[in-house]
Image: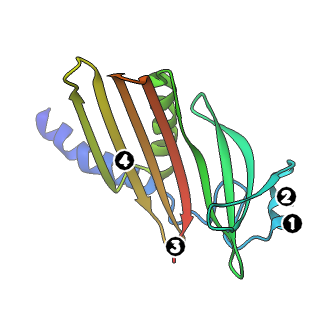
Amino acid sequence: MVRAALLLVPLLASRLALAQPIDVPGWEQTRWGMSAEQLKAALGISLIEERSQIGLPMYTSEAKLGGLTLPVRFTLTPGRGLTEVRLGGGWVGYEREQESAAAEAALIAAFGQPQANQVNEQRTPQGGRELSKVYSWSFPSTVVSYRRGFTTGGTEGTQDLVSISFQMQR
């Protein structure tokens, strides 16, 4: 019985490994290198045009992932088109534990287990909690990163951050 179970472990692991995509050429319907017009056509939504901190064209919208409604920023680089899609990124003053766990599960379902992860959790001197999670997946066209920060008991009270980025490989 134990031997049969041990034989199943590599089989299940190989099937799970097959679930990971070979490549991620963008985010949802977008593809790296798209122009602003192609981006608008692919998403079928009206995007708000802005400029990034370094002056690059950027478009914003919203998306849902794992129960979280997150702002989405699309960055277009001159001569290269769409090079980054970033979901979330701002701190909020309340805990989103269940929603964040659902977002993590959705990413793992889509991309497999993270190829790199770092999780740190500790108690603060004031009796609060600090949590930091960073997961990443690397594909030929794209690096996907998930970041969650959470803190309680600080001077600002509860703070929660979720950020997911899809970046075109250089």
Q: Is residue 44 above or below residue 57?
A: above
**Closest to the observer, 40 or 75:** 75
- For disc 1, the marked residue is 37
Extreme left residue here? 2
Q: CA distance from mark 4 to mark 3?
A: 18 Å
First-in-chain label (4 vs 3): 4
First-in-chain label (2 vs 4): 2
Image mark for residue 40: 2
**Closest to the observer, 71 or 105:** 71
- Residue 41: horizontal and vertical position, in percent? 87, 59
Dot 4, how many residues are within 10 Å of its Cα: few (below 14), some (14-19), or many (20+)? some
First-in-chain label (1 vs 3): 1
Q: Is residue 38 above or below residue 96?
A: below
Q: Amino acid at mark 3?
A: Gln
Number of marks = 4
Q: Residue at x 87, y 49 (%)?
A: 46
Q: Is label 2 in contact with label 1 (beta carbons under 8 Å)?
A: yes
Tell whether 66 sits left or right of 145: right
Q: CA distance from mark 2 to mark 4?
A: 30 Å
**Closest to the observer, 168 or 4:** 168
- For disc 3, the marked residue is 169
Q: Residue at x 51, y 24 (%)?
A: 93
Q: Is residue 121 above or below residue 17?
A: above
- Residue 89: horizontal and vertical position, in percent? 54, 44
- Residue 141: horizontal and vertical position, in percent? 54, 71
Dot 3, how many residues are within 10 Å of its Cα: few (below 14), some (14-19), or many (20+)? some
Quadrant of the rendered image containing residue 167: bottom right
Q: Is label 4 in contact with label 3 (beta carbons under 8 Å)?
A: no
